[in-house]
Structures are given as structure tokens and as C-alpha cells.
Image (tube, helix red, strand yellow):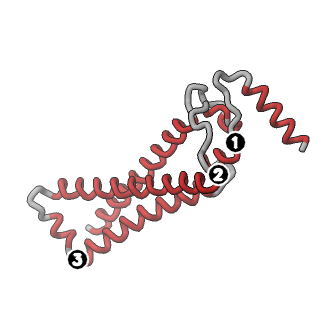
């Protein structure tokens, strides 16, 4: 009990130095950002596995049906067909990622109700004290989700490219 009280007093002293500071429920946002939790890591693995599954199924279907040869002989040229293929893979992976991050928000909302103080400065959370006061909690989460989604989608395109190289 004393340790928790000491931590709370340290947090109060820190929050007095922040403009527009709020006392926010750290446990909710720790789960949202994956601090000390496996939920975010699990969701990232699911997104990566879904993207890998897309690539493997796409490559095996194209190989089994002879579409690889047909794609090489398309009137617009092979490069247009590849760009369309990579674009579709990127969009599909982006959709999967966004669905997974939406699922994360749904699960948090289901567990805790409305997420309070999303417009509070991110530095109000004790594990993000080094970030600027102008960045909000929802702004940081949006940046984090965007970066993770771009990484998963880029990996998907990379896997599609690799399957193209392996099929030759």
C-alpha cells in the first residue's frame, strides 16, 4: 500500500508540472499500448500471420492454376499486373490490420467501458513521460497504429514479391 501511495504522490508532483494534466487510469492505457501486456503482441502476430497466409495461398493458387504464366502474358505487361497484385496485397493487409486494431478497441471498451480522457496529454501516463505535452493519448495511439499497419502491409508486399521470385 505504501509503495502505491508513494507512486501516486510522485505522479501528482509530476502532473503539477504539466499544462492541462489529467489523472488517467494507467491500467487501461497500459493495455491499449501493450505496456506489460501480451495482447498487442498477440494482435500483431495475428496480423502478420494473416498477411503471410494471404501470400502463401495466393502463390499456391497461382501456381496450381497456371495463372503465373497468364499474368506474365497480360496485354498491359507483367509490371502492371504485378503492381495490381502488390496493391491488392497491401490493401488486404491494411484492412486486416485495421480490423485487428478495431478489435483491440472493442475489447478494451467491452472490459472498461468508454475510454476516458483520450484528449489528455500522452505524458500524463507514467510510461510516456518523455513524450511532448502537445501529443494526446489518441494522437499517439493513431501514430502507433499507422506505423504498425504500414509495417504489416509492407511485409505483405515483400512476401508477395518473394513468392514471385521463388516461382520463377
Q: Which residue is mark 3?
A: 65
- Which picture quadrant has residue 12? top right
Give the residue displayed 67% in from the left and 36% down from the top: 125
Image position of 8 with respect to 50: above or below? above
Give the residue displayed 26% in from the left and 74% down from the top: 63
- 154 left or right of 168? right
Image position of 14 with respect to 27: above or below? above
Q: Residue furthest front?
A: 113
- 138 left or right of 97? right
Residue 49: percent from the left, percent from the top?
Answer: 47, 64
Image position of 10 with respect to 162: above or below? above
Of the numbered discs 1 and 3, the one sitting upstream in the chain is: 1
Marks 2 and 3, how far apart at CA: 49 Å
Query: Do tag 2 and tag 1 residues touch (Cβ < 8 Å)?
Result: yes
Closer to the observer: label 2 or label 3? 2
- 152 left or right of 35? left
Q: Residues within 10 Å of mark 3 (few under 14, many from 20)?
A: few
- 146 or 15: which is nearer to us? 15
Residue 20: percent from the left, percent from the top?
Answer: 64, 24
Residue 168: percent from the left, percent from the top?
Answer: 26, 67
- Which picture quadrant has residue 97? bottom left
- Which picture quadrant has residue 123? top right
Q: Secondary structure at mark 2?
A: helix
- 37 left or right of 60? right
Of the numbered discs 2 and 3, the one sitting upstream in the chain is: 3
Residue 117: percent from the left, percent from the top?
Answer: 61, 36
Marks 1 and 3, how far apart at CA: 54 Å
Query: Do tag 2 and tag 3 residues touch (Cβ < 8 Å)?
Result: no
Marks 2 and 1, how far apart at CA: 10 Å
Q: Which residue is mark 2?
A: 112
Residue 114's mark?
Answer: none
Residue 25's mark?
Answer: 1
Amino acid at each position: 500500500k505504501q509503495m502505491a501511495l508513494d507512486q501516486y504522490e510522485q505522479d501528482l508532483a509530476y502532473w503539477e508540472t504539466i499544462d492541462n494534466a489529467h489523472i488517467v487510469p494507467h491500467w487501461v492505457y497500459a493495455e491499449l499500448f501493450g505496456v506489460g501486456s501480451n495482447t498487442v503482441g498477440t494482435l500483431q502476430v495475428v496480423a502478420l500471420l494473416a498477411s503471410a497466409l494471404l501470400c502463401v495461398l495466393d502463390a499456391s493458387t497461382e501456381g496450381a492454376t497456371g495463372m503465373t504464366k497468364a499474368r506474365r502474358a497480360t496485354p498491359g505487361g507483367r509490371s502492371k499486373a504485378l503492381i495490381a497484385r502488390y496493391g491488392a496485397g497491401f490493401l488486404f493487409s491494411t484492412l486486416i490490420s485495421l480490423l485487428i486494431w478495431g478489435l483491440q478497441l472493442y475489447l478494451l471498451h467491452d472490459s472498461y467501458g468508454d475510454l476516458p480522457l483520450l484528449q489528455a496529454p500522452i505524458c500524463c501516463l507514467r510510461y510516456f513521460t518523455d513524450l511532448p505535452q502537445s501529443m494526446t493519448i489518441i494522437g499517439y495511439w493513431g501514430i502507433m497504429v499507422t506505423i504498425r499497419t504500414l509495417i504489416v502491409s509492407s511485409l505483405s508486399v515483400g512476401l508477395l514479391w518473394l513468392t514471385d521470385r521463388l516461382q520463377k
